[in-house]
Image: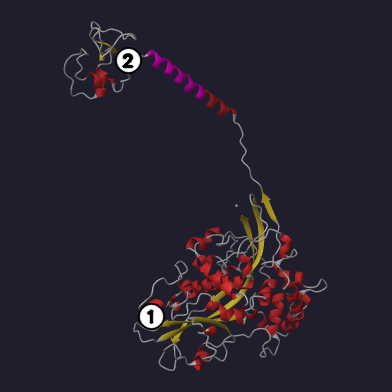
Amino acid sequence: MSTGPASTLLGLATTYVDNGKFADAAALYSAALMAPEAGKLSQQDPWGNVKIPILNPSNLSSPMTGQWQDVKSLIQTPEAYSSLVGLPVVGLPLNESSSFIIETTYLVVDCEPFKKSPYPSNITSQIQRTNYTRLEELVPGQVWSDKSIKNDPFKPQERITSFFIDTDRSTYGSTNDTEGVLTARLDAFLGNQNTTILRNGNDTVREPRKLLFASVYPRGDKEDGQFDLNVAHCLVSQAHVEVGVRCQGTLITYGLAQNFPLAVATGVLASTATERFLANSSSYPFVQNAFSKARESYVDLSAVPKEAFSSRLGLLLNTYYQLSTQPLGYFGSLSRNLSLYGPDVLPATDVDAYLPANLSSVNMTFLDLWSSFEARVQDNQAPFIGATTTANVTTTEEVFVCNFAWLSLLLAASNVILITGIVALILKRMTLGPEFFGPVASMTYENPFVKIPEGGSTLDAMERARIMRDVEVYVADVAGEKDVGHVAFAAGVPLRKLERSRTYA
């Protein structure tokens, strides 16, 4: 699956049109959140897709940039990955080992510490009586601009949620874009660099997009319905990485910002599963019990360290954004027909594959290429836009090699065991007496058929055997003069050899 500009444009042409596939994305997002911790730490998501590790943002400009870094030992928490879901990979052989390189892009979020203030309300700090003018002052934004009872960020699409996200910058086509900066940012995302704006010294084109995250939490221990508003200011940028795999940015659109809080919204006054994951990525994020106190129904995100919150928010934004652009790629049963996923492309230039041959996104604006791109992808039957990579496939098989030295030793030992067994069978056949040889010395205690000096009853078996080392003992017939013999362990008494034809009692 490509994560290049074409994937984003595919989302604009499908998912974001009248909220076309946000329901699919929400279902997949919920499934990813509900996965057990072992699954979140796994190198594959629940559908077997390859998850992309995230490099620490501090390393992106360090001397290590451009070099391969082993991240396997760093996977100790879910936020070590860029997303809870991976990238679908098609065409891998079923019974061979494969290694290949993936070029991909993900969002990097860097947030400041939360600022807490009383919830703006016309009646103390009650959430049901919002003062929208004051809320606009605390959380100014473009997605939820001109906040009102009909444009309530805590009730998107008439559904209750406990947080929302916003941005300070308008999206494409805004009337506020007097200098064409927003248009230039979108064009640059597609590959068309507007050098005129850069030469004019307008660095706004290069600045990361600002994101605002607002969440509510009950104030104090009293059940009086008063809340605090936690607001965090974040910067969102893109990271471009190559990931080596071995197998056995972005547009913050209105649709994404408005639907992300609703992905796992419960419709009740309580923190969502998204917020619970942001508070603790190792715990189960869904509430399983009804709480009697408001503070038990909410999580206080202002208590989360800003580094942890930034990593987790980036993880969830990448997850939902990735699912919303191409949700059909995560329902499994993907065709192994590689031609179905489009021509061979790299993520950086994947838009060009869906434009006429004489056109290139490097020389076109978004407005120029959009109609041609949209017309082509509408007829695309693939579940996602694919990117091309070359894999090295290794077939392994077990090979047995004979070491003649060890073989000789094995045969010699086996022959010794075989001969010993044969001799044992022969001796067994020749022996007429019963097999009661154990600790032989123990059979001499109080034995009337063993004539030895009296005493020694306190000696242990080993000491008694040492003293009697010269005594000859037999298993023989001690009643040789009678018609019916008696077999016993004996020494120093009249004996008669055992005979096969004689009867013994």
**Could you tell me the amino acid type at mark 2?**
Gly
Residue 248 is situated, as x and y percent measured from the top left of the image, at 60, 52
Tell me the quarter of the picture where residue 334 sits.
bottom right
Is 291 left or right of 70, judged from the image as shown?
left
Residue bearing the label numbered 2:
433
Over which residues does the magenta segment extend? 413-430
- Residue drawn at (72%, 85%), measured in percent from left and top? 200
Mark number displayed over residue 294 = 1
Magenta stretch: dominant secondary structure = helix
**Residue 193 among magenta residues:** no
Residue 10 is situated, as x and y percent measured from the top left of the image, at 68, 73
The answer, for residue 213, to whether it is visible in the render is no
User: Observer-nearest residue: 446 or 323?
Assistant: 323
Residue at disc 2, secondary structure? loop
Is disc 1 surrounded by few (<14), some (14 to 19) or many (20+) residues within 10 Å? many
Tell me the quarter of the picture where residue 302 sits.
bottom left
- Residue drawn at (25%, 23%), measured in percent from left and top? 461
Q: Quadrant of the C terminus?
A: top left
